[in-house]
Image (tube, helix red, strand yellow):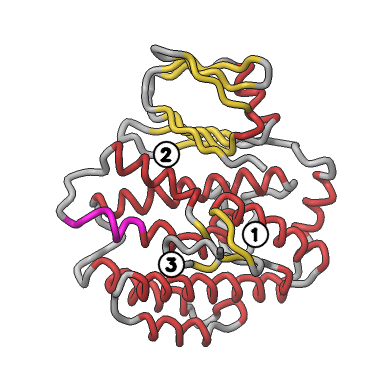
Amino acid sequence: MPYRHVLISNQSMISVRNQQLVIKQDEEYTIPLSDISTIMLENHRCCVSAACLASLADYGISLFTCNDKHLPNGVLTPFNSHSRQLKALENQLAIAKPTKKRIWQAIIRQKITNQAQCLEQMGKPNANKLKHLAEKVESGDKTNLEGVAAQVYFTSLFGSRFSRRTETPINAGLNYGYALFRATIARTLTIHGLLPSLGIFHHSELNNFNLADDLLEPFRSVVDRWVCSNISANEEKLTPSLKKSLYSLFYERLGINQGVSTVTTAIELCVSSFVNAIDNKEHQSLKLPSLLPRGEDGD
């Protein structure tokens, strides 16, 4: 399974040779394509050959681009990489409404549980309140406990004056981390023959990643915890070193499927289990990540 996440911050010529990614800067670096999960192009003076782009798609590698503020604004994901694309799409389209509601219930219950774990691990208040909310999530989250929990969670984690609507380094860090995880989930969905735009709960016609946004929810607390630990309200901007550290969150450990995995592997397990859930019409098959204390590896 691909495990490496490549961040390119300097001017580079990027190509492929003998199934290796070739990065030419002052020196030349090579990385086996089979080892790579994602590539981030942070520098606008990077040049990528057409042959390289085609190879990245063949190997299922996500390529991120950044805007003038060095924040992710685009992603190349593989297309038609699944041998039974039509069958996978038919199963996705055939998901019954009750199954969708049960899947969304499980996602939101785990999201709120992870938020509670984040507060507890960071020594913040209201962790028990969120644990109680998680237990009360109903099918389809028809009482919107996700929204109730969010109001408690973010002010508990970042302070009573915090708002997700303001342009601050904290929000920039959250958005950066979420975007990385979201695009990686979208890439994994396409590899499994699913359409990222066809969601369980999210359904905007303007959103090409509705399903990725659905499955992203329980992963968000990984980013939240790191931002709380590393970005203060007095930070002037999201620095290159902070972004590099955020990009390394793919190597954080999560509990999933009765084991411990990196975020990259947990995304693969989550998507694979989602495919099993819709193929077998059993929402219980869905495996979702749990937030472990940092440094816990299950050994």
From the top left corner, tell me how far across and down residue 121 is, in percent: 36, 71
The answer to whether 74 is drawn above or below residue 150 in the figure is above
Q: Which of marks 2 and 3 is in front?
A: 3
Q: In this view, does 129 lie to the left or right of 205?
A: left
Q: Nearer the viewer, mark 3 or mark 1?
A: 3
Q: How many labels does the image show?
A: 3
Q: Earlier in the sequence, mark 2 or mark 3?
A: 2
Q: Give the residue number, with chain letter if any, for mark 1.
A: 270
Q: Is residue 1 magenta?
A: no
Q: Give the residue number, with chain letter if any, for mark 2.
A: 72
For image coordinates 72% across by 74% down, the residue present is 284
Quadrant for the C terminus, please.
bottom right
The answer to whether 13 is drawn above or below residue 164 in the figure is above
As shown in the figure, which amino acid type bears the numbered disc 3? Pro
Q: Give the residue number, with chain letter if any, for mark 3.
A: 293
Q: In this view, does 165 lie to the left or right of 144?
A: left
Quadrant for the N terminus, please.
top right
Structural distance between the alpha carbons of marks 2 and 3: 28 Å
From the top left corner, tell me how far across and down residue 111 is, in percent: 50, 70
The quadrant in which residue 137 appears is bottom right
The quadrant in which residue 124 appears is bottom left
Q: Which of marks 2 and 1 is in front?
A: 1
Residue span colored magenta: 226-233
